[in-house]
């Protein structure tokens, strides 16, 4: 992807790099929720505390904080498929997972793509 990333700290955007596998959907949802203004969404006590705790961390450290957050881990694991069967996904030609989830936000009149596998948010327009 040739689109350059922006520094999330310079733009007031919550952005965490994905540091654990199979968490891109949770990461995408968190990226969206953490960027909704407080007056528009009550994050609840766990996510509010998490947002405050990670406010001054860089994207890599925010990603580590996501992976070490017990409430986030419990919520993520509660959506795991509870089955005796394992779904095997075909890999694409590059060897990447067949599915990957990212978030999109509108922040200060601009649209950003938040992909935890990238170094930072990508300004879309």
Image (cartoon, rainbow, N blue to C red):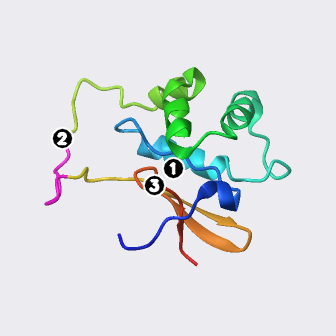
Mark toward the viewer: 1 or 3: 3
- Secondary structure beneath disc 2? loop
Comparing 84 with 89, the one in front is 89
Label placed on residue 28: 1
Q: How dense is the environment of label 2, judged by Cα within 10 Å: few (below 14), some, or many (20 and up)?
A: few
| Residue ID at (49%, 65%) | 5
Give the quadrant of residue 62: top right
Badge 3 crowding class, 10 Å Cα cut-off, few under 14, some 14 to 19, many 20 or more, is some
Q: Quadrant of the N terminus?
A: bottom left
Q: Spatial distance from mark 1 to mark 3, Cα to Cα?
A: 14 Å
Answer left or right for 82 relative to 94. right
Give the image location of residue 87, x and y in percent: 22, 38
Which dot marks residue 102?
none
Given residues 102 and 10, the one toward you in this image is 10
Local SS, label 1: helix
Where does label 2 land, which residue? 88
| SS at badge 3 | loop
């Amino acid at each position: 992807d040739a689109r350059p990333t922006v520094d999330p700290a310079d733009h007031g955007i919550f952005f965490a790099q994905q540091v654990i596998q199979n968490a891109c959907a949770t990461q995408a949802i968190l990226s969206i929720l953490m960027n909704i203004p407080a007056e528009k969404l009550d994050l609840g006590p766990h996510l509010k505390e998490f947002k405050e705790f990670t406010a001054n961390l860089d994207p890599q450290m925010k990603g580590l904080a996501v992976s070490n957050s017990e409430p986030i881990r419990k919520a993520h694991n509660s959506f795991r498929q509870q089955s005796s069967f394992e779904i095997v996904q075909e890999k694409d030609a590059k060897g990447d997972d067949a599915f990957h989830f990212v978030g999109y936000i509108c922040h200060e009149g601009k649209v950003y793509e938040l992909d935890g596998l990238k170094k930072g948010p990508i300004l879309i327009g």
